[in-house]
Amino acid sequence: MRPASMAQTNTITAMHRSMVLEAAHVGKHVLCEKPVALRQEDAEAMIQACDGAGVRFFVCKVVRFFPQYRLAKDLVNKGRIGNLAVLRLKRVS
Protein backbone atom coordinates (compact mmCIF):
# COMPACT_ATOMS: atom_id res chain seq x y z
CA MET A 1 0.00 0.00 0.00
CA ARG A 2 1.27 3.46 -0.91
CA PRO A 3 1.30 6.32 1.61
CA ALA A 4 -1.59 8.76 1.35
CA SER A 5 -0.98 11.90 -0.69
CA MET A 6 -3.92 13.81 0.78
CA ALA A 7 -5.42 14.59 4.18
CA GLN A 8 -9.06 15.44 4.85
CA THR A 9 -10.49 17.40 7.77
CA ASN A 10 -13.54 15.48 8.97
CA THR A 11 -13.82 17.21 12.29
CA ILE A 12 -15.20 20.28 14.01
CA THR A 13 -14.22 23.61 12.50
CA ALA A 14 -12.15 24.63 15.51
CA MET A 15 -9.69 21.81 14.73
CA HIS A 16 -9.23 22.58 11.02
CA ARG A 17 -6.28 24.95 11.39
CA SER A 18 -4.07 22.58 13.38
CA MET A 19 -4.91 19.64 11.11
CA VAL A 20 -4.29 21.59 7.90
CA LEU A 21 -0.99 23.00 9.18
CA GLU A 22 0.19 19.54 10.19
CA ALA A 23 -0.80 18.01 6.85
CA ALA A 24 0.93 20.77 4.91
CA HIS A 25 4.03 20.40 7.07
CA VAL A 26 4.37 16.73 6.07
CA GLY A 27 3.68 17.49 2.39
CA LYS A 28 0.08 16.29 2.06
CA HIS A 29 -2.55 17.98 -0.10
CA VAL A 30 -5.56 19.03 1.99
CA LEU A 31 -9.31 18.67 1.53
CA CYS A 32 -10.98 20.91 4.12
CA GLU A 33 -14.69 20.99 4.86
CA LYS A 34 -16.65 24.24 5.02
CA PRO A 35 -16.59 26.35 6.98
CA VAL A 36 -12.84 26.43 6.60
CA ALA A 37 -12.38 28.48 9.77
CA LEU A 38 -14.22 30.61 12.28
CA ARG A 39 -11.64 33.40 12.05
CA GLN A 40 -10.12 34.94 8.94
CA GLU A 41 -6.60 34.74 10.37
CA ASP A 42 -6.96 30.95 10.72
CA ALA A 43 -8.09 30.59 7.10
CA GLU A 44 -5.21 32.76 5.90
CA ALA A 45 -2.71 30.73 7.93
CA MET A 46 -3.98 27.51 6.32
CA ILE A 47 -3.70 28.95 2.82
CA GLN A 48 -0.20 30.28 3.50
CA ALA A 49 0.94 26.97 5.01
CA CYS A 50 -0.24 25.02 1.98
CA ASP A 51 1.27 27.53 -0.45
CA GLY A 52 4.56 27.47 1.44
CA ALA A 53 4.65 23.68 1.46
CA GLY A 54 3.78 23.44 -2.23
CA VAL A 55 0.60 21.42 -1.60
CA ARG A 56 -2.95 22.02 -2.84
CA PHE A 57 -5.67 23.28 -0.51
CA PHE A 58 -9.20 22.23 -1.50
CA VAL A 59 -12.44 23.31 0.15
CA CYS A 60 -15.50 21.07 0.04
CA LYS A 61 -19.11 21.40 1.06
CA VAL A 62 -20.47 18.08 2.24
CA VAL A 63 -23.84 19.05 3.73
CA ARG A 64 -25.62 18.67 0.40
CA PHE A 65 -25.14 14.92 0.80
CA PHE A 66 -26.60 14.74 4.32
CA PRO A 67 -29.94 12.89 4.43
CA GLN A 68 -31.75 15.90 5.90
CA TYR A 69 -30.67 18.15 3.03
CA ARG A 70 -31.47 15.53 0.41
CA LEU A 71 -34.94 15.16 1.91
CA ALA A 72 -35.50 18.92 1.79
CA LYS A 73 -34.42 19.01 -1.86
CA ASP A 74 -36.68 16.07 -2.74
CA LEU A 75 -39.67 17.73 -1.02
CA VAL A 76 -39.06 20.94 -2.96
CA ASN A 77 -38.60 19.08 -6.26
CA LYS A 78 -41.84 17.15 -5.72
CA GLY A 79 -43.79 20.30 -4.88
CA ARG A 80 -44.71 18.93 -1.45
CA ILE A 81 -43.86 22.11 0.43
CA GLY A 82 -44.88 24.73 -2.10
CA ASN A 83 -42.91 27.17 -4.20
CA LEU A 84 -39.95 28.54 -2.31
CA ALA A 85 -38.51 32.00 -2.73
CA VAL A 86 -35.83 31.57 -0.08
CA LEU A 87 -34.69 28.50 1.82
CA ARG A 88 -32.27 28.88 4.73
CA LEU A 89 -30.82 25.85 6.40
CA LYS A 90 -28.34 25.92 9.26
CA ARG A 91 -25.85 23.32 10.38
CA VAL A 92 -24.50 23.78 13.87
CA SER A 93 -21.05 22.30 14.48
Image (cartoon, grey):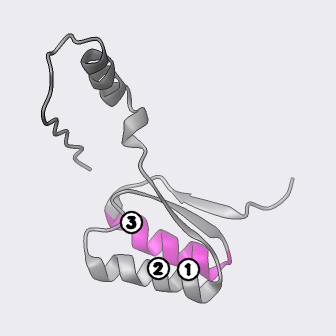
Does the stretch in magenta take in 19? Answer: yes
Q: Position of residue 74 (x, y in %)?
A: 33, 18
Image side of residue 52 versus residue 14, left or right: right
Mark 3 closeness class: few <14, some 14–19, many ≥20 residues within 10 Å? few
Q: Foreground residue, 7 or 31?
A: 31
Occupied quadrant, residue 81:
top left
Region in magenta: 14-27
- For the point 55% across and 76% down, the residue is 22
Residue sitting farthest toward the bottom: 52
Does the stretch in magenta take in 66? Answer: no
For disc 2, the marked residue is 47
Q: Foreground residue, 76 or 17?
A: 76
Q: Are marks 1 and 2 in contact (CB under 8 Å)?
A: yes
* 23 w.r.t. 33: above or below: below
Which numbered tag is attached to residue 50?
1
Q: CA distance from mark 3 to mark 2?
A: 15 Å
> What type of secondary structure mainly makes up the magenta span?
helix
- For the point 64% across and 76% down, the residue is 55
**Residue type pointed to by label 2:** Ile
**Residue type pointed to by label 3:** Met
Q: Position of residue 30 (x, y in %)?
A: 57, 66
Occupied quadrant, residue 6:
bottom right
Q: Foreground residue, 21 or 69?
A: 69
Task: Determine whether the residue tagged by mark 1 lies in a helix, strand or loop.
Answer: helix
- For the point 66% across and 78% down, the residue is 26
Which numbered tag is attached to residue 20?
none
* 42 w.r.t. 30: above or below: below
**Residue type pointed to by label 1:** Cys
* 78 w.r.t. 47: above or below: above
Which numbered tag is attached to residue 15?
3
